[in-house]
Image (cartoon, rainbow, N blue to C red):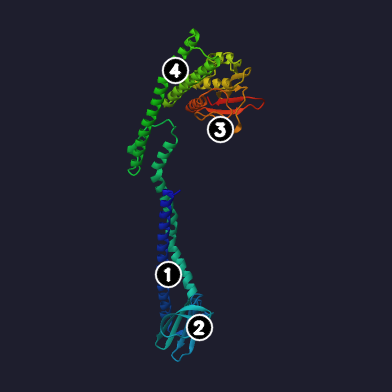
């Protein structure tokens, strides 16, 4: 994936480093040229400053330290010839004397290259030389003193470029974070568009327009599902009443098993419509108003409402309270009471439907640290391990499912759990048959 930030930083840093390198090379070459001119001037100055009485200067070497040898140190070599070509003086440790024509040049003497200045004067010939390696070392030192401010400035400038680019992309990061932390139900437009940079504002405006159109489409879908479910519920209920009345007064006769199947299919259809209506209402909930809710009261209400269904199948349905703080602990949580009732009712109803006659279904309230949790445990067949990750999908029914259902109960429970930021997990019982659905984080 191509990153604009990395691309921009890469080219800026590469361009700045390349220009700095070219500028540094130019400064270094110019410093070397200037140093070379200074050293050539030094050679000429030394040649012109040679004393007129060379013999007297040589004699003074033995009585004073200010003679010719003090001038001809390890950087300079001095040779002086008389008019007859006789070598009058040569610096200590100098290469074999070699006389060059007047002027300045670079020549090879011995194993090294030398910079040589030759000067013809009345009555004598003076020649001053300096190793090229010494001149290069001195020129390098001079160039380094010229370049070190530039070398210090390069990392500082790169750090400044990184800071500027990071600051420039900060609005994009804030916009991405704002969108990434939103819930799936939040379709409100992005706020404070005026504070965004001009380059990012068209993107934010396009996102707002997309969110508005998406919200309109989702609302139309929810409205259609709710209206369809509401319109279907009334005629289906009326049809069930007419069927029961016709069977009771004898106007509808037939095989009892056929009538039972018809009534069962009708009940299943009514249950599906009811679940669709509940799902549509839950989808329409944008935000959950959190209020103190007694989870114990919710559990007692759900167990009471579904007790007849459990008795019809011979199932022992009960409510168990663990880790009570007091005898009448209400297990108070923050949430929406009606939604929590629907979530628990769907979980208990699902457990009753899949538990065989004579089994048990228990709703267990417990405390998990500072929060409250509940478990719905049954003694049914359980769910294959490879299907545990799909049971919360809408309209999904297990491959071996024999009980009647719509495939929406667990999906609705999961939707409500997400709105309440509750973790809903499901696992087969380890010590025996059955399934346990746990809701933690209340």
Location of residue 238 with respect to 176 vertically, above or below: above
Report the residue at 41% width, 55% height from top: 11
Along the viewing direction, whichever of 365 and 140 lies nearer the viewer: 365
Q: Residue at x 40, y 27 (%)?
A: 222
The disc, 4 or 3, on the residue closer to the chain's N-terminal end is 4
Tell me how far mark 1 sits from mark 3, CA to CA: 75 Å
Q: Which residue is mark 1?
A: 32
- Residue with the mark numbered 3: 389
Mark 3 and mark 2: span between their CA atoms?
98 Å
Badge 4 marks a residue whose secondary structure is helix
Q: Earlier in the sequence, mark 4 or mark 2?
A: 2
Residue ID for mark 4: 236
Name the residue at the front extreme. 254
In the picture, measured across the screen, residue 318 lies left or right of residue 25, that is right
Q: Position of residue 95 (x, y in %)?
A: 52, 81
Front label number (4 vs 2): 4
**Disc 3 secondary structure class:** loop
Q: Is 157 on the left or on the right of 392, as rendered?
A: left
Mark before the other along the chain sequence, 2 or 1: 1
Which of labels 1 and 3 is toward the front?
3
| Mark 1 secondary-structure assignment | helix
Mark 4 to mark 3 CA distance (whole Å): 34 Å
Looking at the image, is mark 1 or mark 4 earlier in the sequence? 1
Task: Residue 297: tell me if it is visible.
Answer: no
Residue 211, position in %: x, y? 37, 34
Picture coordinates of residue 4, whole percent (x, y)? 41, 49
Residue under pointer 2:
90
């Amino acid at each position: 994936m191509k990153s604009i930030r990395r691309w921009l930083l890469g080219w800026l840093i590469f361009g700045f480093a390349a220009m700095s390198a070219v500028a540094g090379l130019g400064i270094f070459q110019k410093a070397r040229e200037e140093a070379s001119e200074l050293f050539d001037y030094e050679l000429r100055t030394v040649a012109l400053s040679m004393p007129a009485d060379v013999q007297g200067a040589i004699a003074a070497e033995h009585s004073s330290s200010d003679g010719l040898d003090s001038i001809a140190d390890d950087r300079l070599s001095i040779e002086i010839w008389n008019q007859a070509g006789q070598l009058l003086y040569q610096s200590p440790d100098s290469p074999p004397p070699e006389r060059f024509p007047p002027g300045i040049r670079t020549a090879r003497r011995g194993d090294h290259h030398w910079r040589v200045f030759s000067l013809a004067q009345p009555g004598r010939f003076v020649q001053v030389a300096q190793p090229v390696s010494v001149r290069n070392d001195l020129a390098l030192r001079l160039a380094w003193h010229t370049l070190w401010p530039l070398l210090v400035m390069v990392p500082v400038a790169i750090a400044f470029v990184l800071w500027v680019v990071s600051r420039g992309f900060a609005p994009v990061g804030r916009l991405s974070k704002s969108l990434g932390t939103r819930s799936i139900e939040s379709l409100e437009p992005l706020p404070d568009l005026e504070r965004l940079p001009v380059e990012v504002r068209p993107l934010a405006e396009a996102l707002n327009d997309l969110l508005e159109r998406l919200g309109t489409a989702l609302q139309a879908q929810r409205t259609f599902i709710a209206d369809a479910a509401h319109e279907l519920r009334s005629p289906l209920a009326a049809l069930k009443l007419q069927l029961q009345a016709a069977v009771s007064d004898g106007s509808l006769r037939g095989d009892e098993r056929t009538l039972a199947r018809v009534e069962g299919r009708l009940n299943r259809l009514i249950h599906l419509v009811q679940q669709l209506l509940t799902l549509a209402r839950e989808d329409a909930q944008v935000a959950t108003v959190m209020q103190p809710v007694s989870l114990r009261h919710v559990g007692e209400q759900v167990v009471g409402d579904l007790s007849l269904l459990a008795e019809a199948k011979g199932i022992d349905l009960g409510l168990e309270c663990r880790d009570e703080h007091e005898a009448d602990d209400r297990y108070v949580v923050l949430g929406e009471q009606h939604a929590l009732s629907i979530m628990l009712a769907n979980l208990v109803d699902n457990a009753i439907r899949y538990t065989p006659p004579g089994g048990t279904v228990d709703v267990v309230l417990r405390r998990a640290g500072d929060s409250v949790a509940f478990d719905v445990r049954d003694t049914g067949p359980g769910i294959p391990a490879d299907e545990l990750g799909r049971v919360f999908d809408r309209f999904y029914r297990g491959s071996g499912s024999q009980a009647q259902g719509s495939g929406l109960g667990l999906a609705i429970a999961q939707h409500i759990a997400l709105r309440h930021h509750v973790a809903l997990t499901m696992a087969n019982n380890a010590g025996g048959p059955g399934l346990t659905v746990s809701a933690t984080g209340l």
